[in-house]
Image: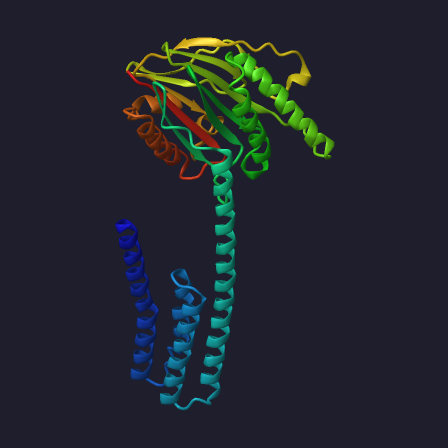
Amino acid sequence: MRRRLVGLLSEWRTGHLMVLLPLGLIVLISVVDIAISPNIHLGPLLVVAPAITPSFGGTRLTALIGVLALIAQVVIASLHGGLFTPNHQAQLLALAVVTAVILAYTRIHERHDRELDRVRTVSDAVQRVMMRPLPDRAGPLRIATRYLAADDEANVGGDLYAAVRTPHATRLLIGDVRGKGLGAVGDAAALLGAFRELAHRHEDPARLADALEASYRRHLAELADSGQDVQENFVTALVLDLPDDRPAARVADCGHPPPLLLTPAGAHPLPLCRTAPPLGMSALGPVDRRTEEFDFPPGSTLLLHTDGVTEARAADGTFYPLPARAARLPAESPRALLDALRRDLLDHVGGRLMDDAAMVAVARER
């Protein structure tokens, strides 16, 4: 509460200080125009005052500054040969018209900002419902997540992750729906709902992936019955089972980038040998999913990610070198690792991602 009050006080002071800029310009232009020769007219410069006000103020403040600029123009005209001369009347009319245009622009901009705030509020609510926060701790594991959406208006898109706690293990899902942004939310929601229900029924990640395939195919059939084109809909996914009683990671891969294992010796992707097609593509032929097991020793961290991370490009077209960069980032906790990775990733791309990116860091405690 104290930090909020300090922040509000800072904004109030900043806003009031900014108001002094257009007011000072009005006073300065008026004084100089009155003081110099009547043949030199600086009154048209008064339009600068209402023009800069929308950068920090709203419609009412802009209108007030515009009225003050018109009053200053009237004062200048009265002291320079009369208010009803054609030159001064033209200056007053021009200032009034420009101020009206600025007010119209400010009103439209405020309406757009309100609509954008509503969209962000809705997307935040969707994210909280669909992408439930993963627990910070699950048995011997510590978990952290980060999600970066490609759409400016939304905080949720086609990348997904979820975790389910069973009596003796933690089961994780990370996936990437074909497409990005709000258009992929429906497929992501369907798969997340299926995972939360089915993760308690299947201990083997490969059999869990098979059940997710069947559920996702039913979802696509419903979309097709409603007239939607779903021929190219699919989801790359990774299903993991992390037992509590032994330092291992059991993985079933469905066309998804392999997790990165970070240890004191460095960072390297898990050497997956059996990668099945993405979910939703079983109609193209038989799919033989297998579970692979890898060492996940205490003190190490598994970094799950979507291709929005590894395919992020810099201005010169180079991809983000995740293993090399992750090996140099602080990994004292999953949260610290993902915070550093997020900053480094955004620096690499210049501040804006072209695809959704999801990251999940899981550390096994010693």
Q: Quadrant of the C terminus?
A: top left
- Toward the viewer: 262 or 120? 120
Above or below 184: residue 63: below
The residue at the point 40 percent across, 81 percent down is 71
Direction from residue 32 to residue 315 in the image, left or right: right
Q: In which quadrant of the rendered view does residue 323 lie?
A: top left
Direction from residue 206 to residue 8 in the image, left or right: left
Direction from residue 101 to residue 265 in the image, left or right: left
Q: How many marks?
A: 0
Q: Residue 85, how many percent across, how many down?
A: 46, 89
Above or below 15: residue 134: above
Q: In which quadrant of the rendered view does residue 16 lie?
A: bottom left
Q: Is residue 321 visible?
A: no
Q: Residue 200, how many percent across, how many down?
A: 51, 19
Kindly give the residue lying farthest to the front in the view shown.
167
The residue at the point 39 percent across, 76 percent down is 69
Above or below 14: residue 127: above
Q: Residue 171, how many percent across, how many down?
A: 46, 19
Above or below 346: residue 365: above
Render colour scheme: rainbow
The residue at the point 53 percent across, 21 percent down is 237
- Toward the viewer: 187 or 169? 169
Q: Is residue 289 visible?
A: yes
The residue at the point 38 percent across, 24 percent down is 361
Q: Residue 286, how many percent across, how many down?
A: 65, 11
